[in-house]
Amino acid sequence: MATSRQATMRSWRWRRNPLRRHSDVIEAWLVLAGWILALVSGLWAGLGTANAVERAADQQRAERRTVSAVLAEDAEDKAPARAMSDHRVWAAVHWTAPDGSMRTDEARVPPTTPAGSRVTVWIDRDGNHSAKPPTSGEAQLQAAFGGLLAGAGTGGAVLGFTWGARLGLDRWRMAQWAAEWERIDTRWGRRTG
């Protein structure tokens, strides 16, 4: 019994009612359109973002590869890499790029590696040092979180705009109500201050 009464109370703007104002009907349509648009645009943005993240990860996996590099300095005296759990250190390495040129950069290596040792580094298609591409599982997780955030952000923005429009309608109704009270008080011979 209580649920049907609650549903009736929520849908009062849709029913014929002598107390219903034109702005109530506008608000009802605005809220309905806002929710539908938030759901559709949130879904569209979430799926689009997830797809873009997946494609970017696939492209990274296709373009990046490992090469053998030579450690240019001892890694013993180096500070540990920033917040890495494998306790690797940053040290200078050099390798031959696909175009035949020699490249030098810093890479994470085991801390006791002596100079001249061979290490494996990831490079992009131009031969520049790059991060390891995400695995398929990591890419799916990134896509899921990216899609969720994009969908929630887009849907939230639409609902925020809807809420702002409802506030504008409330101000408009309050101004109409104040004007109506002013007219009624004038008829009764009183002036409001």
Image (tube, rainbow, N blue to C red):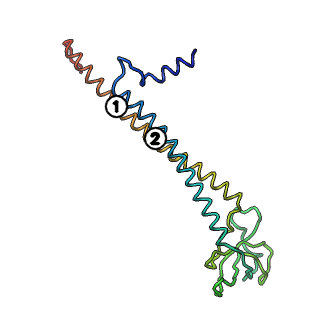
Position of the C terminus by quadrant: top left
Position of the N terminus by quadrant: top right
Instruction: Identify the residue shown where x is 38% and y is 18%.
Output: 17
- Please state the horizontal and vertical placement of residue 5, each as a whole percent of the image: 52, 17
Q: Residue furthest top?
A: 188
Q: Foreground: 95 or 137?
A: 137
Lower sequence index among marks 2 and 1: 2
Q: Helix or strand or loop: what does disc 2 sit on?
A: helix
Q: Foreground: 94 or 46?
A: 46
Quadrant of residue 55 within the rendered picture: bottom right
Instruction: Identify the residue shown where x is 42% and y is 25%.
Output: 14
The residue singled out by tag 1 in the image is: 171
- Please state the horizontal and vertical placement of residue 158, each as a whole percent of the image: 46, 43
- Please state the horizontal and vertical placement of residue 57, each as a whole percent of the image: 64, 63
Quadrant of residue 152 within the rendered picture: top right
126 sits to left or right of 17: right
The residue singled out by tag 2 in the image is: 160
Instruction: Identify the residue shown where x is 71% and y is 76%.
Output: 91
Q: Foreground: 78 or 11?
A: 11
99 is higher (above) or lower (below) than 83: below
150 sits to left or right of 130: left
Q: Which amino acid type is marked by label 1? A: Arg
Label 1 crowd bin: few (<14), some (14–19), many (20+), radius 10 Å: few
Give the Cα separation between the discs numbered 2 and 1: 17 Å
28 is higher (above) or lower (below) than 65: above
